[in-house]
């Protein structure tokens, strides 16, 4: 099975310093935020890799890196074997990737009709020519996502949040992509609508053989959608492997914390000990393993030495405690 | 006697194109010390219910009919001046976004002191001591040093802790918590829910917990009301409603939530969307989306009907053994 997307030791840093003059006056140093820190993963064709984590963990930065909206500061991303920077330069490859955004209100141009929104990639990549052919294709796409071809005449404000997300999906599919990056596609939606969109995305994946990079903070949604899973904390993937393995046997203390923290309808009447502490600032991350201030298993080594990824029961884990068998 | 009784409450928004009925004859009660969860999708009227109780309906919204009784006294006709001693003192409120709830220009200690002195007869010194005490109770580290800090100096989770302290510091009997954890990350959310549960148990406070997250309700509430299109679809003990829903909407809602415990191939989905308030169908509001719809459902609106300990507004409830 070939990988569609492969990330090799990718890092992305942002300069969040104050303006040079102010820095000079107050004697401040440059402030660098490491949003993504030496992350590696690959996504085999027609599968879903999900990245999950709390806000500020770098998952949306990876989404943007994966479609080339950001360039990596270090490392390399390969799309179907080509470095992403050169793939982006070839329209033939570029049309094979697309993105679905979180906010269905902000991601559709309010002044365009739906048919023009959906047709934009078709026109931009010159996939079809002739009004008739394009109109037919747009109608087909709208039917495919559960809307009616006549909806193409309407404007985005005439649709509910769930229907708008269907329009986003139709637009994303219009360039006949093989790879879709979905950045929190359902977190702005109500649960019953979320179920409709998640079912639609899985149907489309099976029918069209799509590959997904799925970003979410909701572990239950991630479990439902993914083949493979990466748990992120402060810019690093701390645990990565098959979804089934991680959910059955979470190894990294942070993964366990996340799984313990989620309110679940199956938990009715049960109580649990909540976890303490908050996510530290990514501008000044803690030394060693960045999770150590919140980790119940932390020891001296965790405070000074950054853990590397090691394979444990088919899952990649970055944790000294797991490696030493203390977990 | 119930602490709060809401009886056939109707909230309307008069407008140029006719009057919108945003809450349509909803009835429920909250007992002393009880946590009532209110769930529903956006636009179902959950937040509006909370706003109506505390007398903070945005004009032109108004209570058109029905009653709200707090410890037997009708408060739905109260003027602003009459409501002022009730807000904070007898009904506290926690809203979704802690940053807009707190005054950015006043230190958190001062905000606590001000709230307590408005409602309780306390000297400056006592109020100050209590403010530190409340910050300690809600788990703010080094409370004595941070009492003079301003809201922007706290993280999101810590701010929501301050908001909880503010809501509870005048010792109200009832707290309305409207999506108190929606703006927070999951690991923080669990801390805040546990804190809210512990403090309200300690102080014997009743809570009306408004949220769209069924998981939060399942773990926190004693009873739950499921709202749909401005009406209560089902209300009952949380275990019955979650595990054995009676209303087809509740059943669909539960089935549409992805579960951590087991993975299903497809989520159960309710097709369509909640009707707009301008176009609520006659009969049961859920009938166009319902899989169990009868002819009667299209013409005759069901009242809340009892089944065991649960009440559901449905002519054709989900059979007990049919629940997945």
Image (cartoon, coloured by chain):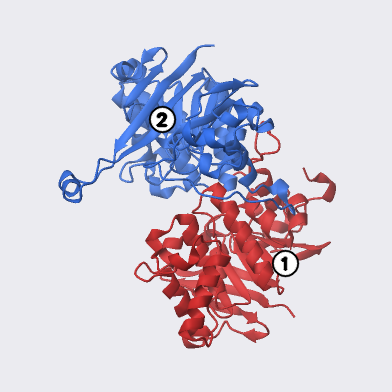
Chain colours: A blue, B red
Query: Residue B291, position in %: x, y?
Result: 70, 46
Look at the picture and state if B238 lies above or below A43: below
Does residue A325 appear in the picture of this structure?
yes
Tell which subunit mark 1 falls on: B
Does residue A144 appear in the picture of this structure?
no
Mark 2 = which residue?
A: A37
Q: Are marks 1 and 2 in contact (CB under 8 Å)?
A: no
B107 left or right of A32? right
Mark 1 = which residue?
A: B303
Task: State the quadrant of the N terminus of chain B.
Answer: bottom right
Disc 1 residue crowd, few under 14, some 14–19, many 20+, Cα 10 Å: some
Q: Residue at x 39, y 44 (%)?
A: A154
Query: Residue B298, position in %: x, y?
Result: 67, 57
Q: Residue at x 61, y 63 (%)?
A: B196
Disc 1 with disc 2 on a shared chain: no
Task: State the quadrant of the C terminus of chain B.
Answer: top right
Disc 1 and disc 2: Cα gap in Å? 58 Å
A204 left or right of B291? left
The quarter of the picture where residue B76 lies is bottom right
The quarter of the picture where residue A103 lies is top left
Q: Residue at x 45, y 47 (%)?
A: A159
Look at the picture and state if A11 lies above or below B245: above
Element marked by disc 1: loop
Q: In front: A99, or A167?
A: A99
Look at the picture and state if A285 lies above or below A68: below
Query: Residue A201, position in %: x, y?
Result: 54, 31
Tell which subunit mark 2 falls on: A
The quarter of the picture where residue B7 lies is bottom right
Query: Residue B38, position in %: x, y?
Result: 63, 62
Disc 2 residue crowd, few under 14, some 14–19, many 20+, Cα 10 Å: some
């Amino acid at each position: 099975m070939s990988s569609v997307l492969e990330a090799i030791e990718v890092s992305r840093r942002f300069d969040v310093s104050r303006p040079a003059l102010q820095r000079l006056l107050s004697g401040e140093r440059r402030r660098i935020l490491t949003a993504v820190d030496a992350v590696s993963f690959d996504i085999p064709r027609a599968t879903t890799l999900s990245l999950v984590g709390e806000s500020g963990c770098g998952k949306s930065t990876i989404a943007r890196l994966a479609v080339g909206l950001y360039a990596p500061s270090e490392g390399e991303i390969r799309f179907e074997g080509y470095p992403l920077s050169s793939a982006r330069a070839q329209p033939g490859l570029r049309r094979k990737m697309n993105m679905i955004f979180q906010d269905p209100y902000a991601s559709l141009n309010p002044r365009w009709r739906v048919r023009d929104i959906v047709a934009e990639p078709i026109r931009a990549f010159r996939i079809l020519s002739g009004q008739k052919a394009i109109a037919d294709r747009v109608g087909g796409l709208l039917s495919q996502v559960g809307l009616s071809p006549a909806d193409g005449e309407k404007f985005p404000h005439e649709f509910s949040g769930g229907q708008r997300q269907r329009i986003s999906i139709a637009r994303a599919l219009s360039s006949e992509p093989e790879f879709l990056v979905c950045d929190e596609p359902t977190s702005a939606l109500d649960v019953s609508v979320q179920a409709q969109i998640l079912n639609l995305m899985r149907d489309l994946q099976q029918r069209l053989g799509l590959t997904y990079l799925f970003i979410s903070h909701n572990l239950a949604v991630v479990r439902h959608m993914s083949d493979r899973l990466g748990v992120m904390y402060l810019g690093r993937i701390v645990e990565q492997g098959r979804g089934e393995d991680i959910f059955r046997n979470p190894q990294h203390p942070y993964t366990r914390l996340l799984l313990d923290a989620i309110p679940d309808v199956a938990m009715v009447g049960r109580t649990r000990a909540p976890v303490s502490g908050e996510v530290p600032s990514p501008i000044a991350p803690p030394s060693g393993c960045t999770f150590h201030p919140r980790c119940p298993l932390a020891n001296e080594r965790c405070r000074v030495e950054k853990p590397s990824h090691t394979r444990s029961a088919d899952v990649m884990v970055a944790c000294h405690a797991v490696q030493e068998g203390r977990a | 006697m119930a602490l709060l009784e809401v009886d056939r409450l109707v909230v309307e928004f008069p407008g140029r194109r006719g009057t919108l009925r945003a809450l349509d004859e909803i009835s429920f009660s909250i007992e002393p010390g009880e946590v009532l969860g209110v769930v529903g999708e956006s636009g179902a009227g959950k937040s509006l219910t909370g706003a109506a109780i505390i007398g903070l309906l945005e004009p032109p919204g108004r209570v058109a009919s029905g009653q709200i009784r707090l410890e037997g006294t009708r408060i739905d006709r109260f003027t602003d001046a009459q409501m002022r001693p009730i807000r904070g003192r007898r009904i506290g409120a926690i809203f979704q976004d802690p940053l807009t709830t707190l005054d950015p220009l006043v230190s958190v200690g001062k905000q606590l002191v001000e709230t307590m002195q408005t409602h309780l007869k306390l000297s400056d010194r006592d109020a100050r001591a209590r403010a530190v005490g409340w910050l300690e109770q809600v788990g703010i580290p080094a409370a004595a040093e941070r009492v003079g800090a301003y809201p922007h100096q706290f993280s999101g989770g810590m701010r929501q802790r301050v908001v909880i302290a503010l809501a509870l510091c005048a010792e109200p009997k009832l707290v309305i918590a409207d999506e108190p954890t929606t703006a927070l990350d999951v690991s923080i959310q669990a801390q805040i829910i546990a804190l809210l549960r512990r403090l309200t148990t300690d102080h014997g406070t009743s809570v009306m917990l408004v949220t769209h997250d069924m998981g939060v309700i399942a773990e926190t509430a004693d009873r739950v009301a499921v709202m749909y299109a401005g009406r209560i679809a089902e209300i009952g003990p949380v275990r019955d409603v979650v595990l054995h829903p009676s209303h087809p909407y509740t059943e669909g809602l539960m089935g549409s939530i992805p579960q951590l415990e087991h993975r299903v191939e497809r989520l159960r989905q309710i097709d369509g969307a909640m009707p707009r308030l301008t176009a609520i169908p006659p009969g049961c509001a859920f009938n166009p989306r319902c899989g169990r719809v009868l002819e009667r459902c299209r013409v005759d609106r069901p009242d809340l009907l009892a089944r065991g300990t649960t009440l559901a507004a449905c002519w054709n409830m989900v059979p007990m053994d049919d629940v997945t």
